[in-house]
Amino acid sequence: MRDDQPTPGSGLEAFDRHHVWHAFTQMQEYEPLLIEHGAGAWLVDTAGNRYLDGSASMWCNVHGHRHPRLDAAVIAQLGRVAHTTNLGLSNPTTVEFSRRLVEIAPPGLEKVFFSGDGSSAIEAALKMAFQFWLQAEPPQPARTRFVAIGEAYHGDTLGAIGVGGVDRFTAMFAPLTFEALRLPSPGGPCPHSGRPAPSLDESLAGLDRILADHGNSIAAIIMEPLVQAAAGIYVHPSGFLRGVADLARRHDVLLILDEVATGFGRTGTMFACEQEGVSPDFLCLAKGLTGGYLPMAATLTTERVWNAFIGSHADRRTFFHGHTYGGNPLAAAVGIASLDVFRDERVLDSLPPKIARLQEHVARLSRLDHVGNVRQCGLVAGLDLVADKASGTSYPWQEKRGTLACLAARRHGALLRQLGDTVVLMPPLCITLAEIDHLAAAAEAAIREVTDQ
Ligand SMILES: *Cc1c(COP(=O)(O)O)cnc(C)c1O
């Protein structure tokens, strides 16, 4: 038996600390925090402390917690059925959600493949792109490679880390993964690599070279459009997405856009790719897909891709891939309700003043002595903590100032999540202007505290 000291309450904190293995968390240093309930943009822990949900519960909450329409949608679906498989059969709710997604997706994305989380949506896109070329007319079996962007993040499963490039997460697993062709990110700067980001023209010229040299062996290019979230909120120069899409078309390479983080309003439009008029061959969605309520992901693709998989059973063109809970009707029901809220509450129209208010705060915070580069795209911002502002010198990473800042923010009533020494502000879209002020004040107090100002 364990010899944990009894803790106040039910002993759950002790069990959490010693038995529950948390994601991306050094368990030796983990301090339990148990959220008991929430409403709107706020979460409340078991001791009754209130926190603004400044990371949208890891970037997925959209309309707030316990939104009446989302809650009602789950309850109504429970009155029908909680789960049925989508292997070889379906249910009305999931079909209706597919129809709604196709309606709002960029033109040409008419086919919907469901899975359980963002990484799975990426795996499905990678495998579909690979299999597409095997079954294309004429077949091009040499197209086995992928081009990915520097510091890309596409999830934590092995295929996803093969195209990922955040080395501190993935380098040790290199022997287990395939190697992508890598295009340095024009976002940034790149605080982790210490080199300046290439310009827009250099990046696109670099991609043109990769495609000219290796085009016939490349299945697809994969990227996060407009902003690379987990890299450290790297915002691409405008025109990069358009340029990549044009080069992909010219070299007849498929384009996979990972909108797991950017989808559902985060950048100010429903999908980030709309802002540069790009329709990819694959669109990967997860996080905000169900308003942040239930795990669900979708890989949308085109008729051209779909057709390469069509044939009789004997033709062996089937996509032999699936996840047990893919297309789960409870998740689909809340996904429909989330799209209803987007429409009926005019959520996208409500964003410009919120984005502007966040911008004002970010500009103010950027003047703090130990805040270096800052970046924002829509309703997400990243603030780099630096030891020396003039030279941009980082803190020694072992000091984990970013982590300390986010822990300090809790004492000021906000839950934040860092990326290295980058403090990230990514609230639910439902946040009010006053709540944005609160979030920024908490971030400022926390940053001052951990940078001795
Ligand atoms: C979170 C994320 C993923 C992975 O999604 P999971 O649901 O955590 O597997 C993939 N791509 C991007 C851009 C993400 O932000």
Image (tube, rainbow, N blue to C red):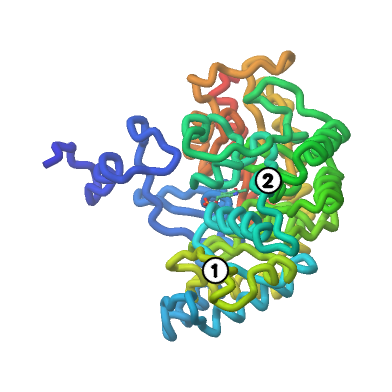
Evaluate whether residue 8 shows in this view. yes
What amino acid type should be assigned to the residue bearing mark 2? Val
The foreground one among 11 and 417 is 417
The image quadrant that residue 27 belongs to is: top left
Label 1: how many Cα within 10 Å (few below 14, some 14–19, many 20+): some
| Secondary element type, mark 1 | loop
Tell me, yes or no, if residue 224 can be seen here: no
Q: Which mark is residue 380?
A: 2
Q: Position of residue 250 (x, y in %)?
A: 86, 50
At x 75%, y 46%, the residue is 216
Residue 384 sits above or below residue 115 on the image: above
The quadrant holding residue 147 is: top right
Tell which of 161 and 19 is nearer to you. Answer: 161
On residue 141, which mark appears? Answer: none
307, 123: nearer the viewer: 307
Give SS at disc 2.
Answer: strand
In this picture, residue 324 sits left or right of residue 441: left
Residue placed under numbered mark 1 in the picture: 67
Front tag of 1 and 2:
2
Q: Residue 262 in the image: x percent, y percent?
A: 68, 52
Q: Amino acid at mark 1?
A: His
Comparing 175 with 98, the one in front is 175
